[in-house]
Image (tube, rainbow, N blue to C red):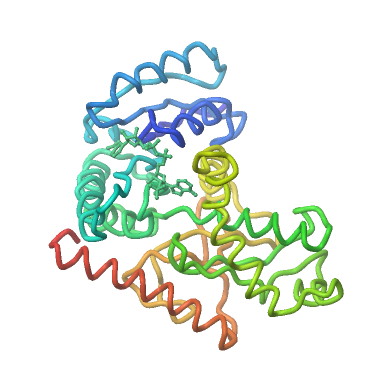
Amino acid sequence: TTPAATVTVTGAAGQIGYATVFRAAAGALLGPATPVRLRLLEVPQAARAAEGVAMELLDGAFPLLASVDVFDDPAAAFEGSEVGLLIGAKPRSQGMERADLLSANAGIFSVQGRAINDGAADSFRAVVVGNPANTNALIAASHAPDVPAERFTALTRLDHHRAEAQLAIACDVSVNDVDGIAIWGNHSASQYVDLTRATVQGRPAEEVLAERGLDRQWIDDFFIPKVAKRGAEIIRVRGGSSVASAAHAALRHVRTWLRGTDEGRWTSMAVPSTGAHGIPEGVVSSFPVTCSQGGYAIVEPWAVDEFSRARIDRSVAELLAEREAVAELGLL
Ligand code: NDP
């Protein structure tokens, strides 16, 4: 085994947090050889519930769980932290204006960014799950000037997984046969699920779909909305929002980042734009990426077709508007 790694989970008593911590304790985050020290952060009202989660974690007698501690103070929770799963966020309530949502979350993520700046380990990496995830990641990064900005990422892996699964179903193949999907832009309804570079058993996905009578129109009218609206469909059918699949995606996001993508394969992560693919710097946007040796690289730009360009630009415009709104509130 390797030395224990310190992982901070925010919103640990919430639904996604609850679904995440047990699997992290079982090795799904850092692998079967790395013990984990869990630091659970909650708001004071939920700290007692988080204590209950910690008790259940102890009751799991997980061989890899080196310690579990509960905090309601971000500075303490991020002390020595190497991985941050930033799940807790203020949900949109009935009648809430977008500016109120942004400002409530900016309050949370600016404080956490500062705590990370002051106390986290040099190797610290974060994935933001709490919405608006991309902009929350931007805010946290902007309050952590001593931490490289590229360490603050946001989750679009669930969207990526949903697209992989739906493409595999449409082509009647295993998800292992599917690659090259790209999720672009914001983790919101404006996201663009791009199949133009996707492959199925090594062949262009659009070609394989066409053989099954599924053309570009089907992709636009059925596939893309199916993935973008999957969260709402889950709520309708399950009677509750996506929880275990979101937790799984967050764990996989970090696991892939640390371990690397398989040779020749991609994933999607929302990361600070480098200006690549015509997406301006200053936003945290989803991109197709490869990972290796604890880092990630945006997949080399290609000549994006007109349809994709318009969809990417529309989602990026939403990110720029969120950024503008937060900047106007003086929170960046
Ligand atoms: P969930 O655990 O269900 O969701 C947590 C966050 O994940 C929400 O912002 C949610 O966004 C977001 N999310 C991102 N992607 C997805 C997805 N694909 N499907 C569903 N959700 C997604 O919320 P709970 O209310 O159960 O738990 C939140 C917890 O966070 C509470 O315990 C609260 O006390 C805590 N909290 C902690 C803070 C802290 O540690 N400082 C600060 C604020 C809250 P959306 O709302 O859009 O569904």
Q: Is residue 126 visible?
A: no
Q: Is residue 203 visible?
A: yes
Give the x, y percent position of residue 60: 54, 14
Outermost residue, left side = 330
Q: Nearer the viewer, residue 119 or 111?
A: 111
Give the x, y percent position of residue 186: 43, 64
Give the answer, above or below, for where 173 lies relative to 236: below
Q: Seen in the image, is 61 located left or right of residue 18?
A: right
Q: Seen in the image, is 189 located left or right of residue 319?
A: right
Give the answer, above or below, for where 138 lies relative to 205: above
Q: Nearer the viewer, residue 135 or 103?
A: 103
Image point (25%, 31%), residue name: 43
Q: Which quarter of the figure has residue 292?
A: bottom right
Image point (86%, 75%), residue name: 211
Q: Quadrant of the C terminus?
A: bottom left
Q: Seen in the image, is 226 located left or right of residue 52?
A: right
Q: Seen in the image, is 109 located left or right of residue 62?
A: left
Give the x, y percent position of residue 56: 47, 15
Q: Quadrant of the N terminus?
A: top right
